[in-house]
Image (cartoon, rainbow, N blue to C red):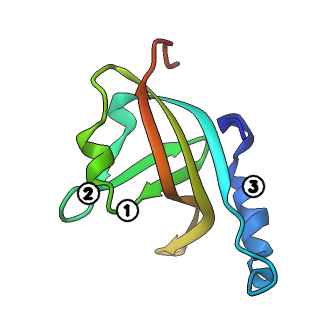
Amino acid sequence: MDSTEVSSEYIFKLNDMKHLWGTRLREPKIMVSNIKIDASELQLIGKKSNIIKIIFNGVEYIMFRAEEIIANIPDGNSLEISLIGKPNTNEWNGKVTPQIIVDECEIEASNSFVF
């Protein structure tokens, strides 16, 4: 999917179907490409700063144990990200946030401008 096609509404719809996932129906994975962000929007979080968090189009993208990816983030002001992950929602303090838990991620320097 192109990054503009993944919205919070899309993640919430998938989350509403999670009761269907099991032995006969695998949990869906989503491939997202062309996430273009300013490098400052990529957040390193967690006690060891080894978790990547990106918020794009109302969806949080979370990658745990991302030391290798972090070590290879290219220099530059703009980044283009492609990834594969599982849809999820996170509830904290009464707020439900749509997320994609990232399994695989590729981050490249982007030549285009981010607006």
Q: Residues within 10 Å of mark 3 (few under 14, many from 20)?
A: few
- Can you give x and y, in whole percent of width and height, for residue 51 in the image? 32, 57
Q: Quadrant of residue 63?
A: bottom left
Spatial CA distance of label 2 from label 1 is: 7 Å
Residue at 65% from the left image edge and 48% from the top image edge: 31
Q: Which residue occupies the foreground of this view, 96 or 41?
A: 41
Please tell me whether mark 3 or mark 2 is closer to you in this view: 2
Residue 64 image label: 1
Q: Which residue is mark 3?
A: 9
Question: Which residue of the protein is positioned furthest toward the left in this rendering?
Answer: 48
In the shown orientation, is residue 25 left or right of residue 62?
Answer: right
Residue at 72% from the left image edge and 41% from the top image edge: 1
Spatial CA distance of label 3 from label 1 is: 24 Å
- Can you give x and y, in whole percent of width and height, for residue 35 in the image? 56, 34
Question: Which residue of the protein is positioned furthest toward the bottom in this rendering?
Answer: 23
Q: Which residue is mark 2?
A: 50
- Can you give x and y, in whole percent of width and height, for residue 49 in the image? 22, 56
Q: Secondary structure at mark 2?
A: loop
Q: Residues within 10 Å of mark 1 (few under 14, many from 20)?
A: some
**What kind of residue is marked 3?**
Glu
In the shown orientation, is residue 73 left or right of residue 36?
Answer: left
Please tell me whether mark 3 or mark 1 is closer to you in this view: 1
Spatial CA distance of label 3 from label 2 is: 28 Å
Q: Earlier in the sequence, mark 2 or mark 1?
A: 2
Q: Secondary structure at mark 1?
A: loop
Above or below residue 58? Residue 25 is below
**What kind of residue is marked 1?**
Phe
Above or below residue 51? Residue 37 is above
